[in-house]
Amino acid sequence: GENVEQHPSTLSVQEGDSAVIKCTYSDSASNYFPWYKQELGKGPQLIIDIRSNVGEKKDQRIAVTLNKTAKHFSLHITETQPEDSAVYFCAARRRVGDMRFGAGTRLTVKP
Amino acid sequence: EAGVTQSPTHLIKTRGQQATLRCSPISGHTSVYWYQQALGLGLQFLLWYDEGEERNRGNFPPRFSGRQFPNYSSELNVNALELEDSALYLCASSERNLLAALPDNEQFFGPGTRLTVL
């Protein structure tokens, strides 16, 4: 089955710096790659997604890149703010309704 | 518009007992997904229901089961509870999502039910 690995498990940056989280997947048939943000006591919330026919997508301060050949995708957050502190999950979908998640990255943005 | 709701918020059981967790999807959503979020392990896919039928299940034993009701709400049942079943159980809903050729519909998550098995 699909296996999604996510790195790093924890990330601490200074406010204003950039943060990068990387994920790799195993199933070349995966075609949809969302990123979720989970704040304390809440369920994950979709922040950006990318499909396998696109190499990069940007939404204000966040961007995602996808390298299908290498089977990895990354989340980039620029100009980080304390409210960006949360746990971030990547995911890969290889078939409808079957989403596989990475183990999560705890991001801390220090003011 | 109300989001995905789950009940109860917390549930404490002992080994061998059964647990029932409930989920109400966003109005208009027909698909419901269940995930287990154990500490340090991310989200593990459990079950997917759409239009009252189980469409797919993850790599979990048969004592994890569920159902979806005509109003699209869903129940997750865990029988013969084990200590390692302690986790946050998340429910998500989306619009109908049956055709692989179409873009995946966004999954909206509820706040979860924290199950503790003693």
Image (cartoon, rainbow, N blue to C red):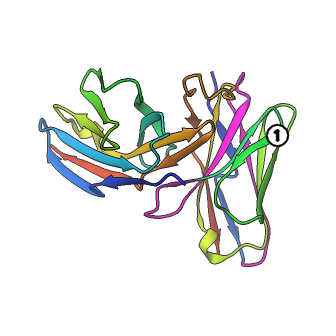
Q: Residue at x 12, y 35 (%)?
A: A16
Q: Residue at x 35, y 43 (%)?
A: A71
Mark 1 nearby-residue class (10 Å; few <14, some 14–19, many ≥20): few
Residue B21 part of the magenta segment: yes
Residue B106 part of the magenta segment: no
Q: Quadrant for residue B27, please give it.
A: top right
Q: Is residue A48 above or below residue A74?
A: above
Q: Quadrant for residue B14, please give it.
A: bottom right
Q: Which residue is mark 1?
A: B53
Q: Quadrant for residue A78, please give it.
A: top left
Task: Compare residues B23 and A51 and report the one nearer the observer.
Answer: A51
The residue marked by circle 1 belongs to what chain? B
Q: Secondary structure at mark 1?
A: strand
B69 lies left or right of A109: right
Residue A21, image x, y percentages = 27, 45
Task: Compare residues B39 and B43 and report the one nearer the observer.
Answer: B43
Q: Residue at x 63, y 38 (%)?
A: A97
Q: Quadrant of the C terminus of chain A?
A: top left
Q: Residue at x 23, y 40 (%)?
A: A82
Residue A57, image x, y percentages = 31, 23
Whether residue B48 is visible here, answered yes or no, is yes
Three-letter code, disc 1: Glu
Residue B69, image x, y percentages = 85, 38
B86 lies left or right of A58: right
Q: Which residues are magenta?
A: B15-44
B37 lies left or right of A56: right
